[in-house]
Structure formats: structure tokens, C-alpha cells
Image: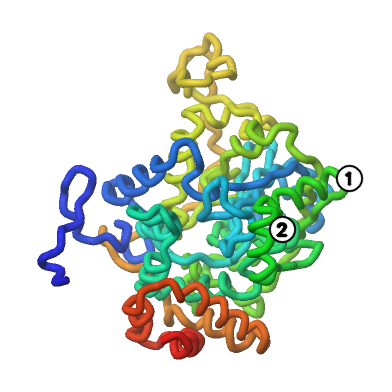
Amino acid sequence: MDNNKRPQLTTSSGSPVENNQHSLTVGTDGPTLLQDFHLIDKLAHFDRERIPERVVHAKGAGAHGFFEVTDDITKFCKAKLFDTIGKKTPVFIRFSTVGGEKGSADTERDPRGFAIKFFTEEGNWDMVGNNTPVFFIRDAMKFPDFIHTQKKHPQTNLRNADMVWDFLSQHPESSHQVTVLFSDRGIPDGYRQMNGYSGHTFKWVNKDGEVFYVKWHFKTVTGIKNLHPDEATRLAGVDPDYSTRDLFEHIDKGNSSEWTFFAQIMPEKEAATYRWNVLDMTKVWPHSDYPLIKVGRVVLNRNPENYFAETEQSAFSPSHIVPGIELTNDKMLQGRLFSYPDTHRHRLGANYQQIPINCPYRARVMNHQRDGPATVNGNGGSLPNYEPNSFAGPVENSKHTIAPSHVSGQFIRQRTDHKNDDFVQGGQLYSKVMNSSQKTLLVNNLVGAMKGAKKFVKNFFLFLKNFFLLFLFFLFLII
């Protein structure tokens, strides 16, 4: 249909949308602006689309444990949880599928959420990642659209291959994640036998104020193990809660599960000239450039006493950080900083951090937030709730300053500077990492997933310039 004859996209207030692809930022790669009403409008509505189930990561399993420092990384980061070898910090981890509802099967082909809450003496730090080191998109503006393609069709309430592949065909930056998802690692064999990754790039700051860009990796000690699609399909029918059951029963028998915590660390000055945009969530840093540096170990050894109270009510956000860990201008991360706490307030209430599983109990919370539903912490007692005041209220702590960074540029909606193209890393994964059997399985998985899509959706891939050889190959098979 001629675009001039189609309805025009608007905000919820009816204002025309001039650009639905890119967030409003300061310069090409600057921070996202709070004044971007279209982004906030889009994300805020998206966060409230499911009641009370999580919009994404609805089905999950969790366990308690600890993080132990095994290596000295204090020259990179001043956070207290890293300050002493042997130091232990309590943790709670929630694993999850992403697109499915609470009643979906654990063995669906889907990324897996990997969220760790560190209960530190400086407050809670949430590492909110996935079992893949990359993601489908690089701008939070597209996140609601992407998740809509993973949900049910508005008319049929059925999963719809047209929506999935139409979206992916128009977002070539997804090629790397698609290659990972449809590879032999696309269906983990339970939660214990998969890795976790931050995906986003964050900052570490040391005691001298030096800044390092960092990506976090959590490598399973058990070893990665994945399900063949045929076995995953069988388990979906006979034991749809397979991964949840496996984690609980493993710990219930007195066993533990362990991951080794590594970091890739890049001095801030090297980011500007690096061959990839370090703020692009669709890219990885090759280990040959920035090898893994060991930090410690994470051990899970205790099941929740009550699933709802602990696992279901647990609430993670990348905005929950501690001194020494700071944020970057990654556009996907910037959107998540708003969206995650916003959806928690919608789902659990304004005081969701007073719920025991979320409470930063190793730090003393002192602020002027009062009232609201489910206030259970004494509500600040008799102290006045404003700052500054003359009645012994909490004061600022000037020693915890954020590392300064320079930002300049025009207010503009523009694609992230992704450097090179979107197919190199996915193509390298296929051509240089996968063996012949893995390549065959990848192609078969893609062909099977696309069979339900309309031919014009499949054909659209042919028009993508420089699309890497793998996709040309499987298109040849199915068209």
C-alpha cells in the first residue's frame, strides 16, 4: 500500500510521530533525553500492558547464594563488594524465559534472563543480563515493537511467524542475536548449564577516578549443555517446567550450582578508536582484544521458601548500582533505566523495594520517600520528609561523586554509530566458530522457524544488502 494512503503514526495524545526508529539523544551517541515524550510514552504504556504478570521474563525460577571475591580487581573498581579477596556477598538470582507467558514451556527457543541481585553494604547492585552476550536491537525505542512480535497476534491470539520475521528482516542489527538464538545454544538444558552476560557496557571507576568500560561474563562451572530441538519439543509436552524443576531439585538434594565471574575491561580512552561501538548491544568485544579477567565466583545453594514471596516478587533493574559501578550512554540501557523500575512500580507498587526479597537490608536506607501502598518500613517515623532540614535528617555524601564525562551535540533522532556493518560478527560466528554439524543445525532451525511466514516476508530478506552467506543459503532452501 502507498505510505501516503496509510494511517499516520501518533503519540497517545494524537501528535504525529516524525521518527519511530531512534531515541532523542545529545549527538549521535550521547545520553537519551528525558524530554523525549514519544519514547517515554511508548515505554510507559508498554510497561503496563500486562496485569499483573511481567511483560517480559514472565516465567522464571530463582535461588539464593553468595558471591565470593577470588581475584584482586581493585585497580579497576572501588566498589566495596570487590575490596577484599575472600569477601562474600549474599545474592539472589532469577532465571527466566523472555517472550513466553507464565504458563509457557521452559524449553522454548528463546533467550534466557540471568539477573543477579547483590546485597552489598552500599546498597543493592542488580546485574540484569541474559544468557547471550548480544541482543536483537540497539535502541530502546524499538523494544516494545520487538516484544510485540514475540507475543500473540492481536486477532488470533496465536504466535505469528509473519510478525517475528517481518520485524527481523527490517532490523539487520538482529542478525548476530538471531544466529546465536537459532544455533545449538538456542535452547539451554536447564538454567544451571548456561552462561550469563551483562550484554550492555557499563563503567567501572577506581579510587583514583579512572574510568574503565566493562562487560561482565558469568561462566557456568558445570559446563554449557543444550537441548536438541526434538528433545525440547518432547519435554514441552511431558514436563513444561523442566528447567524450574531441575534447578529446585538439584539444590533441594543438597547440591549447589556455580558460575565464575569474569570481566572484559577496556580503558575509557580506547573506546573512541575501537573497531566496534562499545555502546552497541548487538556487538561483542573479541576476547583476543580484551581477554576475560577473573573476578570471583557465584554459588547458588538455597531454594526460596516461598515462590511468590521471593521469586515472583523479586524486582531487578540495571539502574540499581553502587559506587564504583556507573552507567553508559548505551541507548538500550538508557531506556531500561526508566522502564524496569517503572514496570516494578506498576506490578508491585511504589514501595517494591520494601519487599523483603528486594530490600537492601545490608545498607541503611535513609531517604524522604513516604506513604504509598504497602509501606511497611515505619514510613520514616517522626522525621520530616524534606532536605535539607534542621532536624537531624539524612544529608548528602559528597565523597560518592560520579566520574565526569563530556557530552556535546545537537538534539537529534539518529541511528547509533554502529561502525562497519551489522553482519560481520554474526558471519564470523557462523564461518569461524561453528563446525559443520552446528552450521547444519542452525540452518535447519531457521528454515523450520520461517516455514510459517508468508512468502513475501521471506522474500524481503533477499533485498537486504550484504546479508551474510548463511541467510542467503537458507533462503535458497525455502524459496
Q: Are marks 2 and 1 in contact (CB under 8 Å)?
A: no
Q: In the picture shown, does residue 419 fall above or below 222?
A: below
Q: Amino acid at mark 2?
A: Gly
Q: Which mark is residue 395?
A: none
| Residue under the image location 42 percent in, 45 percent down | 338
- Pick out the residue farthest to the right: 254
User: What residue do we see at 52% from left, 30% from top?
Assistant: 396
**26 and 470: which is toward the camera:** 470
Residue 99, horizontal then vertical, whole percent: 51, 55
Position of residue 172 in the picture relative to residue 264 (left or right): left
Residue 450 percent coordinates (x, y): 46, 75
| Residue under numbered circle 2 | 190
Q: Residue at x 47, y 66 (%)?
A: 136
From the viewer's perspective, is 442 left or right of 51?
right
Quadrant location of the C terminus in the rendered image: bottom left
Residue 64, image x, y percentages: 75, 41
Give the residue type at disc 1. Gly
Q: Kindly identify which residue carries mark 1.
A: 254
